[in-house]
Structure formats: structure tokens, C-alpha cells
Amino acid sequence: MLSASKRFLAHSLKFPRGGAFEPGGGRGEIPHQTPIERGNSMKTVSRRIAQIGFNAGKLAAAAALLVLAAQSALLAQSEKAAEIRIQADQVTGHVSPLFYGLMTEEINYSYDGGLYAELVRNRNFKEDPKDIVHWQLVQQGGATGSMSLDPGTPFNEAVPLSLKVVIDKAGGAGRVGIANDGFWGIPSKPNTIYKATFYAKAAPGFTGPITLAIVGDDDTSIRASAQVSGITQEWKKFEATLTTGNVPVTAENKFVLTAANPGTVWFGFVSLFPPTYRDRPNGFRPDIMQLLAGMKPAFLRFPGGNYLEGNTLETRFDWKKTIGDVAQRPGHFNDAWWYWSSDGMGLLEFLNWCEDLNMEPVLGVYAGYSLRGGARITLHSQLQPYIQEALDEIEYVTGDVNTTWGARRAKDGHPAPFKMQYVEVGNEDGGDNQPGSYETRFAQFYDAIKAKYPNLKVIATDTVTTRVADVIDEHYYRRSEEEMASHASEYDSRRVLPAGFGKAPREVFVGEWATRVGDPTPTWTAALGDAAWMVGMERNAHLVKMEGYAPLFTRVDPDGLQWLTDLIGYNTLSAYGSPSYYMQLMFATYHGDDVVSIAAKGVPSMEWQPPAGFGIGNVVRPGQKVQTAGSRGPRPQRVPVIPQTGPVQQPAPQQVPLMHFDATRDSKTGSIYVKVVNRASTAQAVHFALTGVSSVEPNGRTITLTGSGPDDTNSIKEPTKIVPVIANVSGLGTDFTRSFPPYSVSVLELKAAK
Ligand code: AHR
């Protein structure tokens, strides 16, 4: 089998002869001798998309490379040019204001150890019922003591235990205490304020003081510290700030709480926060939020994904246990992805996240089904509490302060209701293989939601026939660029939805999708497959109303992920966007609101052999993971396994287009945005003919993303290797030819007058 890069170079381009125009990525052919444009491309100074925050020197170098690449490509390109016909006055759909969004769940340490900025791991000591994981006993300067989990001294109802620290011998330089190793370390950055909170009580005779410090792993470098005294025999909350000076930027630290007096002290909850996005208490990591803001997401689908369902009723996303004071939240074992969830990222935090980025919530409600049949509740009498749970949840999000749950939200700190239009019933309920189960469950949820909230649109996650779902959520995970590209035109022929969807007009929500090549984040070949797919969705925006790549986040540290190929990667100190992230950022930034007619001829293609056993057109359901026995139960391996759904057979080879197109127009300004994906290893000329406009200015812009080869990628060490470059261009009009670099995704911005 060829390696990815060899495969890339080995494909032979086919230029079809004869045939008709096809939407956006056609395989028809026409004899074509259009003279190619020379010498007028990418002349001007490039600049990069503003929001990303970019190193200007690197940009200039990248831009220069791009210009060089484009020029040499112009010389090397084939005589043949694909033909693109754009009818700008033929509007085929409208890009929904909610089109580009985010899908999220607790996977790959998305929140704990990720977006949620808490630095202390196992902050209420419940993560493991037997071990005090992520905490170590500190005994310094000859002092001695011990620590143990103490169910006899419960912290509160949600946390029915505490951490008992007995200081037997201490004094002077002799200190005893506890140290937390955080999520792959505790960060220290210069001149930064860290906010600590802890709850403690003591046996008679001990009042402190307790010293809190961020300490280097060498145990001697104190990055910042503070002292708290006044510990009493009752549980009490203590707060302190720790301010660093000119300390190194490093994650090789611990958070340490020690005392120099003998005695016994219990801790119920220990927390440490760095600065958060917009200074929100209990808030989010600014670097990750800034990356997300760049994507201009319009909605957030949460809380899952498998995380919504859990493996059992008890381990579902039980939203009522995720609101209010964080010290009173029990947390739960996230058995969908095999790690502890503090539930610091609770329902209101998801909504705050929406508010911070101007996103609309798309709320997934638990629908009586947990993974692997862990729960399946279809009987009305048994399902009713969960239907009520969903109605209460919707009220918490949207109800005013005079409603029960709206009042609770106000008490939790947010009196204003949130705007929400979509509610999703369950997640991937096609995985519930009991006949009629989802149908029955969906109908009951649908009726109850519509009765109380008639304006809400209800999303189904699988085919239903007894109710007309407003929207269907479809998930597509593909195993290669070619596989994704082979499906890129699928929605062109989906004018009518499949049987079983009733008669009403439908909306599609592509709620999870990805080309799964890249560990931990997508490589350039994946981004090209993703771009082909995005073009297909955008071209069919009359049908596809919302889309969200999944998964969104991953830790890049060892054992930091359960699912390969995730959009944004981070460690304790920094975060980066993958090539696919930048592609999506480009798409969401540069588009019009009207989709206009586009047809292609003479598009080069390659022969692709689909892998045996893969059902073309199937929705791939990667819910099944290879698991190995681990000390704390089976844990998913870093191996993507996609279950086969049909008999294993060798499918016929396919011709897959190497270029993909769509066009949108800004109905106010008239500007037209043409998206061109060139997956070929050589530059490709394209001849454009536009009608339905009175003129197109000769000067416009291109926004281009290129990779040097399929394995090229961004990483925590090279976070901006592949980023979009903007160039002013000339030679445009209603009839022109341009060349597109090898392995590139481009947006061509045409200033057109209607
Ligand atoms: O995105 C990862 C998982 O894929 C989601 O949790 C689930 O919905 C899908 O199977």
C-alpha cells in the first residue's frame, strides 16, 4: 500500500472530454483551449486574516512563497482549464445565519484540562474512590505527616468525603501538605494573577496558616505564593491570589498547600484559576476562546455526542447536577470517554460560552437512551421524568425569571434568558438498534416540546416516521481525503430527502463530520477532504442549514485523547488550529448570504479504489472503540476503528473529482465569493464565465490556504505553518482564467455589480 504522500503523487489526473455542466465538481468534459492568464496573479502585498494574530515576518515569507508557487504553477500547468459557469442572478439557496457552528462535548479533555480554565485536577477528591489521584503528600525539611480520603468527614451532600491531612511533626522549615499536579502540569506565566479557592476545616488546635504556592517540579522554585489563616472547626471558604513576577513560562509546576504547625486539617475542594477570557469567574482559557472566535461560529451544539448519553442513566449529562456553586457539584465519571468530569463546565457555563462568542445554543437533551444499551426507556410512564427533565432544561435556558427554572438561572447569576431555536432529541440514535425505540422515544419528546414550545425546532438524530422532525442531524466521519471528496457532491442530488422523512420540507444539520487523517489534529490531506465537503455543504445551503466539525478539541499530551483527528489542539501552555481549522475559518469569514448557481465542466479527476468493506454512502458510525483492560476499566486506544455495517465486498473503483467549487453572493454589496478546492498535485487553470451581473471589477482578492503535501500540518510546535494568505489580484471580470496552486483551498472575492 502506498504511503499517504506517495499516494498523493501517484494519482493520475484525468481530464474528461465532452459532457455537461455539473454543479460545483462535475466530471463532464468539454474540449477546451482557453488561453491561460499569465503574470497578473497575486501581485500585491498579502495580508493575513486579521483575527488570528500573526507574526508579520512569517506572513511575508509565506506570502512570498505563495506568489512563487502560484507563478511557477502558472508555467507548469496543463493547457486544459476547467470551465466554471456562474449565474449570479440564479439564487439556489440562502446560507443560514446559523450555518457555521461548533459541536462540542467532554472528549479528549475538552473542558477539564481544556477550555474550562480550572488548573487543579481532582479538586473535590472524588475522581477515584480509592486513590487520591493527582495529589501527593508533601513532607519538607524533616517534617512528617499523612493524607487520606475521609468519608467520615463529608464536605457536603455532593461530596460525601474530604481529604484529611495529619501533620505529625512540623515547624521552622519543616512543612507538611498536599501538592496537585494539574492537567499535565500547572502553568506559570510572568506577571500573572492566579486565583485560588479552597474549603477547609481543622481539628481543635490548628488554625493555619496555610501557604499556597505554585512551585516548580524541582520543589524549590516558587513561582508565586500566598498565605491564608483562620481555619476553624467548621467548613469555610478561603480565597487568595497568587501573583507571579518574572517567572519562566513553563508547565513543570505543582500547586502546593502546606503548613508548618502540627495538627489535622481537612480539605473539601481546592481550585486554582488563571486569568480567563473576559475575566469570567469559573471561565475559559483565553487562547482557545480566541481561536474559536476566529471561526465566527453562529451556534454551539452541546453537551454531546456520546457524553450526553453516557453508558448508563447515572452517567448521562444530568444537567441539574451541573448548575449552581461549583463546590456543590458532584461531578461524574464520563464513561463515554473514560475520565472524570468535574462538571465545572455545566449547563450555565455552556450558555456563558455561547454568550461570549455570540453563538446560539443548540441544546441536545437526554432522550432515554444510554450507550451500548446501558439504558433504553420507551414506556411513557418511565420516560416521563426524562421528558420533564428536558422541558425543565429548556426552561432554564429560555424561560424568564417568573418561571421556575428561569428563576433558578437568575439565582445562578444570569437573569436574562438565552435565545434558542433548536433542540436536539438524543444523539446518534441510529445506534439504538431496538426496532421502534427511537421512533417511540422521539415522538414523546417531540409532542411534549412542541406543546410547550411551539416555536422551537426539534432535531431528530435518526429517521422517524410518525412525527415530522424539523431537522435531521447527520454525521459523517471519513477515513481519507478521497473518501470524503467522493461524497462531496452528495447533497446536489438530495433535493428530496430519503423515504421515511414525511412530506414536509426538511433541513439537514450536519452535526458531526471530519476526514479522519491526522493524530492528534488533521493533516493537510484531511483539510483538503474537509474543504471538498464544506464546498458541497455550502453549495447546498438550501438543504444544509447548519454544520459542525467534530470533535472540536484535543489535548496533545500523551494519553490526552480518545479520538484521533480533532480540530484544535492544546497543551497546558498554548493552543493551535489545524489546517482544517483555518480552512473552516476562511469559509465562515468569506461568504455571501445567497448561494448562486454554479456549474463545472472539464474538472480533472482521479481514479480511487474505495477500501473493501466500506459501504459507499453509508453514514459511518464510529461509536465503537477498541478497548483494552486498564487499571480503572477499559480505556479506548488511540486507534480509530470504524464498524463495518454491511457485508464485506470489494467496491468498484470510482472517478473522484480533484476540484470542487461553489459560489455565494452578498445580497447587499453584490460581492461574489467563489470557493475553489484544488486537490491535485499540480496547479490547475480554471476559466470562469459569469452571467447575471452588470460588471465585475478587474481587481479583487484571493484568500488561499496551501500545504506542501498531504502530511504537512500545524502542531503545538509549529502552530501557524499552514495559514490563509490574502492577496490582491487583478485581471478579473465576467470572463477570465486563473490558476490555482497545487493542494490549495482558495476563496476568490469578486467585486460584482448586480
Ligand atoms: O465525535 C466523537 C463521537 O462520534 C461523538 O461523541 C458521537 O456522537 C460520534 O459517534
Image: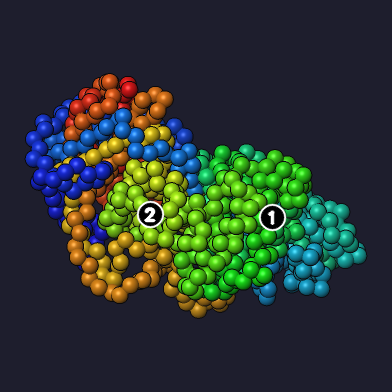
Disc 2 packing (10 Å; few <14; some 14–19; many ≥20): some
Give the secondary structure at mark 1.
Answer: helix
Quadrant in the rendering for residue 540: top left
* Mark 2 vs 1: CB contact within 8 A: no
| Residue at screen point 13% across, 35% down | 75
Of residues 417 and 111, the one drawn nearer to the viewer in this rendering: 417
Question: From what the image shows, is residue 753 above or below residue 279?
Answer: above
| Residue at screen point 13% across, 32% down | 36
Quadrant in the rendering for residue 603: top left
* Marks 2, 1: nearer the viewer: 2
Q: Which residue is mark 1?
A: 392
| Residue at screen point 11% across, 41% down | 30
Mark 2 or mark 1: which comes first in sequence?
A: 1
Disc 1 packing (10 Å; few <14; some 14–19; many ≥20): some
Q: Can residue 280 be spotted in the picture?
A: yes
Question: From what the image shows, is residue 630 above or below residue 216?
Answer: below
Question: From what the image shows, is residue 239 above or below residue 316?
Answer: above
Of residues 137 and 501, the one drawn nearer to the viewer in this rendering: 501
Q: Quadrant of the N terminus?
A: bottom left
Quadrant in the rendering for residue 521: bottom left
What percent of the width, then of the height, locates residue 473? 46, 55
Q: Which mark is residue 497?
A: 2
What percent of the width, then of the height, locates residue 674? 30, 35
What percent of the width, then of the height, locates residue 517? 35, 58
Q: Which mark is residue 144?
A: none
Q: Label 2 vs label 1: CA separation? A: 32 Å
| Left or right of residue 577, residue 617 in this image | left
- Amino acid type indicated by mark 2: Leu
